Image (cartoon, rainbow, N blue to C red):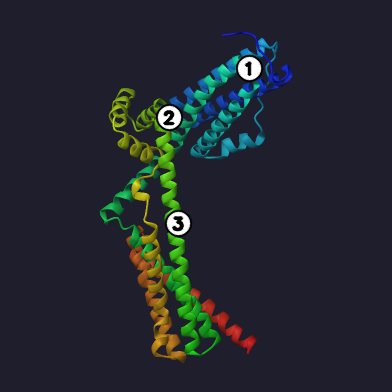
Amino acid sequence: MRTNIETNTVTKQDLIETLKINFLREVEAAATYRSLADKEPDLKRKEILFMLAQTEEVHAEMWAEKLQTLGITELPESKPSFWKTLQLKSSSLSTNLNRMEIEEHRNIESYEAQKRYGNANITDLINEIQEDEKKHAQSVRTLANSSDPQNSLQIYLSRERWHKRGGAGWIGDAIYGINDGLGAVFGIISGIAGFTSSGRVVLVSGLAGMIASALSMGAGAYLAAKSNRELVEAEMHHEREEIESDPAHEREELELLYQLKGFTEQESAMVAERITSNKELYLKTMIQEELGLSEDQMPNPWRSALSGSLSTAVGAIIPVIPFFFMSGVPAIMTAAIVSIVAHFLVGAGKSLVTVRPWWQSGLEMTLVGVIEGTITFSLGLLGNMFLH
């Protein structure tokens, strides 16, 4: 490798300033990783963070050597900003790790831009450091995703609970649809009933609210499911590309994931070898272990839309029903009683998709309904007083 520095496209001073920035970037990254390692209670994770810090220090030494070849013997002093220091001290470990992943990607982009200098000596070094930075970004992402074992356990248990109940995702959508429809239309008819005693006006208003709520919920459910499906598909596509373009790095990441789970390096290598031998299993494992996603999280948008619309319509029609058969105060009182009871039943039904006691959830929903009805009815009465 040549020892001289060629500056065909930039001045020598420009190159020196760039290399100083590179040096400081690596020094600050090393200091950050060491700080995170000092706070990390898990020995395995601490070891990984120290290794990342050591690699960054090596990178800094490389840039220091390049600066020396340009006649720079006094290296710049690293002075982290007050804001960065405050963020590091006040943020959680996972948040800091996420920031470092972003920083690693920024470094990769910055180094890529520096290749335009056309200096073969610098470009060779940049290529070498970029490879390390890519590994660092993957390692940091893995550490961040596994930084909260309790949360991971809760997610796992939650998935198990759903599977044992027959994949009850649509049940949850239906219950929340009924909840929204009931709450929205009960509020509408309460306000209209306070404004006018005409049962026909209340009935038409309730039906209009039911249709609007059902269509709105269906459209929202469709778009949400479609977006979620597209997100999972995009992540799977991205992960597949990474596996195909850089299988060695992805395998290292997989091994690291299992080391973080408590496997030894040899055991992790054996597991990774078995998984990587099957392409589909390899992809599914990386998606699930690294991103916490799976093909089960790809709901059918049309089914979600239908479930959301119908359930919202069912909930919305409940407070309207009495106005088909009555009018005046009896209709209003009956609608209020029916709606309050329905609020309790829907709230109790929510316990199917939550961990709260059915009676507590039911009473909470009842209280919400009473407050909602009281406020909207009062507003209707005020409107009647001032507009008539």
- Left or right of 226, for residue 56: right
- The residue depicted at 40 percent of the width and 25 percent of the height is 248
The mark that comes first in sequence, 3 or 1, is 1
Cβ atoms at labels 3 and 1 below 8 Å apart: no
- Give the label, 3 or 1, closer to the camera: 1
The mark that comes first in sequence, 2 or 3, is 3
Viewer-proximal residue, 67 or 130? 130
**Looking at the rendering, in which quadrant would you find the N terminus?**
top right
Label placed on residue 224: 3
**Label 3's element?**
helix
Residue 190, compared with residue 214, is above or below; it is below
Q: Which residue is mark 2?
A: 245
Viewer-proximal residue, 138 or 226? 226
Cβ atoms at labels 2 and 1 below 8 Å apart: no
- The residue depicted at 52 percent of the width and 34 percent of the height is 101
Viewer-proximal residue, 167 or 91? 167
Query: Disc 3 and disc 1: Cα gap in Å?
Result: 49 Å
The mark that comes first in sequence, 2 or 1, is 1
Query: Disc 2 and disc 1: Cα gap in Å?
Result: 26 Å
The quadrant holding residue 327 is bottom left
Instruction: Point out residue 13 in the picture as x, y percentages from the top left corner.
Output: 73, 18
